[in-house]
Amino acid sequence: MPPLKIQFLGTGTSTGIPMIGCDCAVCVSDDLRDKRLRSSVLVQSPNTSIVIDTTPDFRYQMLRTQTKHLDAVIFTHPHKDHMAGLDDIRAFNFFSKKAMQIYANSLTEEAIRRDYYYAFSDSKYPGVPDLQLNTIHSTPFIIGDIPIIPIEVLHHKMPVLGFRMGNFTYITDANQIEDIELEKIKGSSVLVLNALRKEKHASHFTLQEALEIAVASQVPKVYFTHISHQMGKHAEVNCELPSHIQLAYDGLSLSL
């Protein structure tokens, strides 16, 4: 397994932080860690670069990380805050002169074909995204030199994919993980898991629920993502958490 660099492109929920029209203490905070774009990560080995999800902030996320090459995009699920930025793949197509490899389950593939129908037209308009779809099943697969194990979780009733890449596991938009899938996480050195807020939610883990999963996973370092302004200020919430379990923040970089 090659060494991996993980960059958190965004750690916010679907509205981002600050939220439009909101003047709560989190949304007006001067702490840069309280400024959250929509949730996504960039995973890089010495030879391969992968983005998990293309958020509505995808273009800006690529610009501020100065990402000039991308081998593939893998999708967790088809909600807009995770795939609305896909059209901006066009820039990578232009410079690489190649189709972008897209990995998704059949549900997300269907949404991509529907929402980006013009990329799959028989008579394409010049400059539309060039996408090569690859269907993710339950079996492991490899992109470049990065092996990937799909982890199947539930987002209310929607099947969502998490991914384990070597010792790194990434799960977002979940409120249920079966024991058989939890076993795939164990042995990781880093787990990223969604934790929306402290109050109960129909389709996301609360902070307490995420803490319970973190403990059950037995992973030594855990970061929470997909965070709402309702969670509270980054610095204050982190003070309430164990030192090995912390809120992630935009721009956080890890080396594994």
Image (cartoon, rainbow, N blue to C red):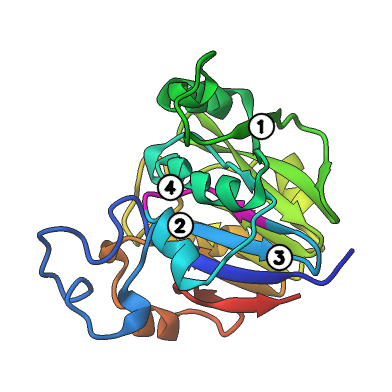
Closer to the camera: disc 3 or disc 1?
Answer: 1
Name the amino acid type tagged 1. Gln
Q: Residue furthest top?
A: 122
Q: Quadrant of residue 230?
A: bottom left
Residue 53 part of the magenta segment? yes
Name the disc covering residue 132, or none.
1
Give percent across and percent down for residue 119. Answer: 50, 26
Q: Amino acid at mark 3?
A: Gln
Q: Which mark is residue 204?
A: 4
For disc 2, the neighbor class at 10 Å (few under 14, some 14 to 19, many from 20) is many
> Label 2 vs label 3: CA separation?
17 Å
Report the amino acid beneath label 2: Ser
- The span from disc 1 to disc 4 (Cα, nearest Å) is 31 Å
Lower sequence index among marks 2 and 3: 2
Amino acid bearing label 4: His
Magenta stretch bounds:
50-56
Residue 39 image label: 2
For this view, does 203 lie left or right of residue 171? left
